[in-house]
Amino acid sequence: MLDLGTPGEPDAAVCAWPQVVRCRDGVWRLYYHSLDPARMVFVVCLAESADGLTWSKRGEILGAGAPGAFDAGGVGTRHVIEHEGHYLMFYEGVGRDGYRSIGLATSADAVHWDRQPGAEADGSVFAHAPRGSGRWDAFAVGTPCIVPLPDGAFRLYYVGSNETPGGFADEMAMRHQIGLALSDGPDYTVWRRW
């Protein structure tokens, strides 16, 4: 259905973690991420379809953040929802050191995205637990899944992982577990761990 890009395209290495959203304009949009081999950063790419079966690629729509940012190594898994007339993308930001936090981008058309600064010390909206704390999610919080609630609040389900002596190179030794955070009422930029 969707093949790798040609050499030089941002999705030449891999097309992974798809999410399909049928947008209010009737277009099916497939968000996926890749590791751009030229820049060695994770990027979010987009393909569109009129029927959900035949797809045309639009290319990269969200790449690495600024140098030193929590997402300077790129953007991995994400969850896109429509909320109050615009679109929200909660995404796993990858730091150059491999640590991961969750960021937020917004869009009016589900194609062009703007990063939103978060209140966490690293600039994200939901950060991994402090380094060296020994907590179960001190290395990474990612793979976000956002659930809007009837009272206007949100739930954020996520995958967390602990630190290991080898860092990301030791990923198979990490424990990956599922966590839950609750929004501060309708404010989806402030979260507390449940």
Image: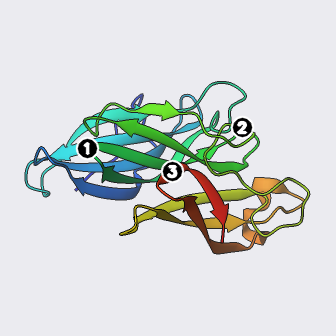
Q: Nearer the viewer, residue 170 or 48?
A: 48
Label 2 secondary element: loop
Label 3 secondary element: strand
Residue at mark 3:
187
The residue type indicated by label 1 comes to Gly
Residue at mark 1:
85
How far apart, in angstroms, are the residues tagged by discs 1 and 2? 34 Å
Say which residue appears at 12% left-offset and 51% top-offset: 54
Q: Left or right: where does residue 11 sit relative to residue 1?
A: right
**Mark 3 near mark 2, Cβ–Cβ under 8 Å?**
no
Residue 59 at x, y percent in the picture: 32, 34
Q: Left or right: where does residue 182 sit relative to residue 11?
A: right
Q: Left or right: where does residue 55 sit relative to residue 13?
A: left
Residue at mark 2:
96
Is disc 1 surrounded by few (<14), some (14 to 19) or many (20+) residues within 10 Å? Answer: few
The residue type indicated by label 2 comes to Arg
